[in-house]
Image (tube, rainbow, N blue to C red):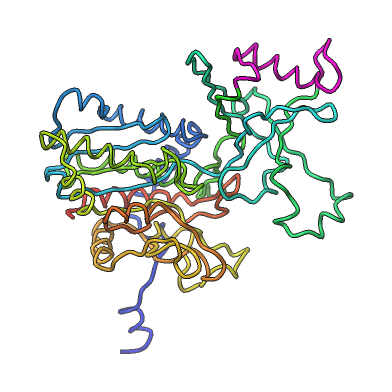
Amino acid sequence: MAAQTMNKALGAEFKLGWKKLEPGEDQKVLNYAEDYKAFLDAGKTERLCAENAVKLAKEAGFRSIEQAIESGEIKSGDKIYAMHRNKTVMLFKIGEEPLEQGMAVVGAHMDCPRLDLKPMPLYEDSNIAYFKTHYYGGIKKYPWLTLPLALYGTVVKKDGTVVKITIGDAPDDPVFCISDLLPHLSQKLNQKKVSEAFEGEQLNPMIASRPLSGEEDGEAVKATVLKYLNEHYQMTEDDFASAEFEIVPAGKSRDIGFDRSMILAFGQDDRICSYAAVRAMLDASDTPQKTQCVILADKEEIGSYGNTGMQSRFFENTLAELVALQSDGSNSLLVRRCLSHSFCLSADVTAAYDPNFPSTHDMYNATFAGKGVAVNKYGGARGKSGGSDANPEFLGKLRKCFDEGGVTWQLGEMGKIDLGGGGTIAYMLAAYDMEVVDCGTPILSMHAPWEQSTKIDAYMTYKAYRTFFNYKW
């Protein structure tokens, strides 16, 4: 056998997803992309993403965990959602097997890098009013300069009244902006490292410049902002103490390219996987063998801490409620058996190879835009530190699952060994003794204000999760 023939017969090759579509499937890719973009545009924050995920679930016949508890039982085919503190969502389709025999789990996160307002953010300097911010997650600071920005907030007053604020994304809304230093005066700045040239304390958007009549200089523009917030939202400066405000890029997601085959949008890490997980469950079999579960967690970008992050107990607490409904009472052993017998895809994005920065990847183990959903056997950084490492027994089954389901997938890792790396919620799910592997969409410009993905990879991520749910594990 000639060497070329031998390589073709026995070698591994990951092909472009567009070339592996079934007849007529290309239109499904385009339709899915439009639905995905609409989800992104309606969910600029994790709270809005949670609301929209629940909305989709309810439209598909899901009932709340509270309703299930009130009914006193669950049965095969039941569809249940749980909303946790307005930021985390879990979806379940109860399978034919009892829960103690495990679940098919897809776990993603809905938070993404952004700018949060500080507890007392409003100030005036040189006749311009600003908001002070504290960046959330790992960002490069300079891409946030001179962008049109939008403000999303939730204010809870002392009497419990909730006020929601959205400014910057409606067509006639004003936007906000962080200034940059002109190149004519940047000689000293240009000598600094990129990581040192822009400080977090400088990421303060301009929000007003017109003084309020009758107010003292130095506070008159700030008074203009306070007057606006009070007239439109009945808010005082004290209300910032019990508020949550996020600064995000203003504008809707857009198609990229003459062929419109790519997507430019904020928050694709990790909402591209979150949406795929939700859609996959909604479109998967309604009579699964194992219970299907989707986790959409918060706080992943800052270590999954807090009571809405994956390191809290919301997931196992919710699972315990379901086990109690199925087994006529609480049984912690059944919960542990369920977790230990489960199979899980940690649904998070990975870094696609970027030809503009060719030195960042080992080309034999890089993932590429356009070649489908990516499976990363392990995560972590510099020696796999802080990551999860999938077992070959699970990966063998997953290969069979994807290949039989017509999923275009690829294998790789996030960049060269000594350059860095990244973590996901995989190691936290693995702590439950589940079989877990990272499986998500390769994207470009991860953690930038505007990230890029291909429509074929977004679709194949959805197809992978749907196939995973339908597989007989």
Q: Nearer the viewer, residue 153 or 465?
A: 153
Does 116 appear in magenta? no
Q: Nearer the viewer, residue 297 or 374?
A: 297
User: For this view, does 381 lie left or right of residue 143?
Assistant: left
Magenta residues (range): 210-239
Location of the C terminus by quadrant is bottom left
Q: Quadrant of residue 85?
A: top left
Give the x, y percent position of residue 456: 43, 52
Height in image: 142 above or below 133?
Answer: below
The structure residue drawn at horizontal position 28% and vertical position 48%, both measured from the top left corner, is 105
Give the x, y percent position of residue 25: 34, 49
Height in image: 254 above or below 339?
Answer: above
* Residue 127 in view here: yes
Q: Quadrant of residue 52?
A: top left
Height in image: 222 above or below 106?
Answer: above
Q: Quadrant of residue 169?
A: top right
Q: Nearer the viewer, residue 309 or 449?
A: 309
* Residue 258 in view here: no
Does 233 appear in magenta? yes
Location of the N terminus by quadrant is bottom left
